[in-house]
Image (spheres, rainbow, N blue to C red):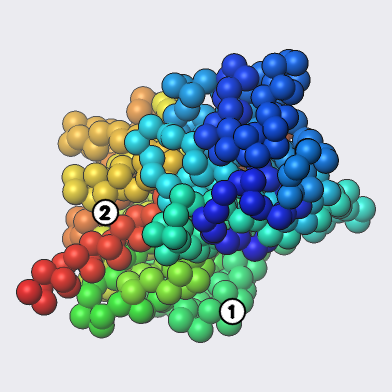
Amino acid sequence: MEFTVKSGNPEKQRTACLVLGIYESRRLTPAAEQFDAACGGYLGNLLRRGDLEGKPGQSLLLFNVPEALCERVLLIGCGRERELDDRRFRQVAAHAATALNDTGATEAVVYLTELTVKSRDLNWKIRQIVEAVEESRYRFDQLKSKKDAPRRLLRKIILSVPGRRELPGGEQAVREGVAIAAGSALAKDLGNLPPNICTPTYLAEQAQALAREFPTLRVEVLEEDELERLEMGALLAVTRGSAQPAKLIRLDYRQGPAARKPYVLIGKGVTFDTGGISLKPGEGMDEMKYDMCGAASVLGTLRACAELKLPLNVTGLIPAVENMPGGRASRPGDIVTSLSGQTIEILNTDAEGRLILCDTLTYAERDEPAAVIDIATLTGACIIALGRHPHGLFSNHPPLAHALQAAAHAAYDRVWELPLWEDYQEGLDSNFADMANVAGNRDGGAIIAACFLSRFAKKFHWAHLDIAGTAWKTGKAKGATGRPVPLLVRYLLDRTAEAEREDGRAAH
Ligand code: BES
Ligand code: MN
Ligand code: ZN
């Protein structure tokens, strides 16, 4: 899909489809009003007749509007003007995108950018519309022999901005929205792929393919013998039961000043989580193919960095393993030595995410990171605590937590912080090793898991995102969401702006 921005009056647009908002109840938005004046009050009459209330979710497609230069007009219900907040705007944009896909128009000029959304600016609205359009067009049908290919005629979307002054900012917003959407789509594809295809080897190949597509990305894949040489005992304990070889995938993006420390993103890449010897119940186990969505979000984020040519240094680290039972699998009670030297009693082989992440965290020390963020479908307990709307956020450095909260708000890819208090740490006491990998009870499971990770993140600023509830949807609309790619890309865009401000100050 091609997106552009343009300033101009609605009645002057010679286009296949004009998209205008209608407030509840039956009130024209300013652009709709302007258009209506030019076509002799046609819209106003139509609304008075009761054909469209303007409720969110409603739409009406009109042809042959008198005096109009455009072929069609798509009216979109926006709800009550006073109630138009960011959440409602996203619903309206998503609905407009779906309605637009169903028309026969090849091109559309969209005026929903003019809606006033509390505490959100024009560029936010542009990004949201771009992301909504791409989201509405996402399909995962590569494994269906008969594709119910929708007839997709729409090729180009033109987003209206008030004047010429808003064009450069609007174009940048389009670029950001497009890159975020493409990164999310990559993350969704990887998440949706079945576990017999999306293995650790496959993830490594995808990282290599990404580095071929974007020469600013350099990839390195550490094989099991190298992980043994490094003595990553915790990571290796997880892969023991699997016939699939484990990989530690490293992607380097170095487009910032050489002296500037990198941001390190670590993504949990368990391509299938059976639980191991602590086997999970059978019901719904297929969903454990999504246990690599943290890894997928790291690949999606690095793709967006490369596409946006961000002047930053970013490293992606992906421990990729499959967690299987078997004669060689780790047992409950096994004690292993992590790369950090700390010993771990594996009381539950289903708490495998923290085992692969802890060694990867220690490995990240050698990069002297500016900050480390790990992203993991880590605990069912996080879903119990927060539901499926925000990611669980934990951090050992309040400014990093604040930066992530700000990015989450800006991207509307929300987080909620949970405590990492010292009081919780004793839950991990072990009689036989430095720590156990689980606590003796189920209390605060998401926090206990984060406490475990925090023991391996003492040497840098660190944040942990538990995305168990947010990386995929269950039920009828089952599928990967591509989250938290929008949050991570926004966080890195914010760091770019921050670096520019600092450089500006240094120059004065
Ligand atoms: N991958 C799961 C977490 C998970 C569960 C994500 C359900 C999404 C939905 C993780 O490896 C796991 O099994 N965690 C255990 C930890 C427990 C053994 C302490 C869990 O959450 O039950
Ligand atoms: Mn598990
Ligand atoms: Zn898992």
Q: Position of residue 257 (x, y in %)?
A: 26, 80
Tally of numbered discs = 2
Query: Does 43 appear above or below 473?
Result: above
Q: Nearer the viewer, mark 2 or mark 1?
A: 1
Spatial CA distance of label 2 from label 1 is 30 Å
Q: Residue at x 48, y 31 (%)?
A: 87
Of 69 and 83, the residue lying toward us: 69
* Mark 1, secondary structure of its residue: helix
Q: Residues within 10 Å of mark 2 (few under 14, many from 20)?
A: many
Q: Residues within 10 Å of mark 1 (few under 14, many from 20)?
A: few
Q: Which residue is mark 1?
A: 213
Determine which quarter of the picture holds residue 116: top left
**Mark 2: which amino acid?**
Trp
Q: Which residue is mark 2?
A: 462
* Mark 2, secondary structure of its residue: strand
**Mark 1: which amino acid?**
Glu
In the drawing, does residue 291 fall left or right of residue 192?
left
In the drawing, does residue 498 fall left or right of residue 65?
left
Query: Does 423 appear above or below 409?
Result: above
Q: Residue at x 72, y 54 (%)?
A: 15
Whether residue 270 appears in this view of the structure is no
Query: Does 365 appear above or below 376?
Result: below
